Image (tube, rainbow, N blue to C red):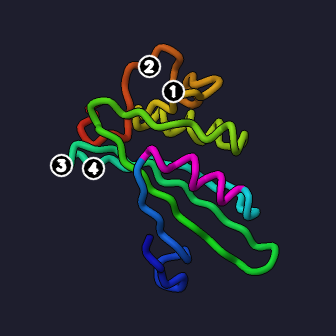
Amino acid sequence: MFDCNYAKRGYHLDVRLSPEQLLTAVGILFDHGFFIESITGVDWIKDGQLEATYDFCRYDFDLCRIVVRTRTPRANPILPTITGIYSGASWHERETHDFFGIVFEGHPHLIPLLLPEDADFHPLLKDFKA
């Protein structure tokens, strides 16, 4: 975990963890009243990895933003779904799957959200060519 300067970075805490720790961390955030704002991907092509970035927030007592990051091998990008904890994460995971190809294992309906149903490409990968 890394403490962050909100004025400088836009979040209070930046947490980097393994995929095996993801559900536990997300469950803790849920139990403490955080909501999911977004999920997106980052292609670390030179490292051979894809990163999922989860943004959480709560502002019932004071603004508090947390970023959770986890990486998976680019060649076989699989992460656990968090839809069992946050049902609203469903479309975020579908969009991230569309654009980066990350498979969210256990997702109840991981079909294309924005791309054609027969799409076999992920346009936000750095080596994508149209």
Helix, strand, or loop for circle 1? Answer: loop
Q: Which residue is the site of mark 2?
A: 119
Q: Which residue is the site of mark 4?
A: 44
Amino acid at pointer 2: Ala
Task: Name the residue nearer the viewer: 32 or 109.
Answer: 32
Amino acid at pointer 3: Lys
Q: Is label 1 in contact with label 2 (beta carbons under 8 Å)?
A: yes
The dot on residue 115 is 1
C-alpha gap between disc 4 and disc 1: 22 Å
Give the residues drawn in magenta, as a range: 19-30
C-alpha gap between disc 2 and disc 4: 22 Å
Q: Is residue 37 above or below residue 85?
A: below
C-alpha gap between disc 3 and disc 4: 6 Å
Query: What residue appears at the point 51 percent right and 29 percent down from the top-left corner?
Result: 105
Residue 23 drawn at (x, y percent) = 57, 46
Magenta part mainly helix, strand or loop? helix
Residue 49 drawn at (x, y percent) = 28, 44
Classify the position of the C terminus by image quarter.
Answer: top left
Q: Which residue is the site of mark 3?
A: 46
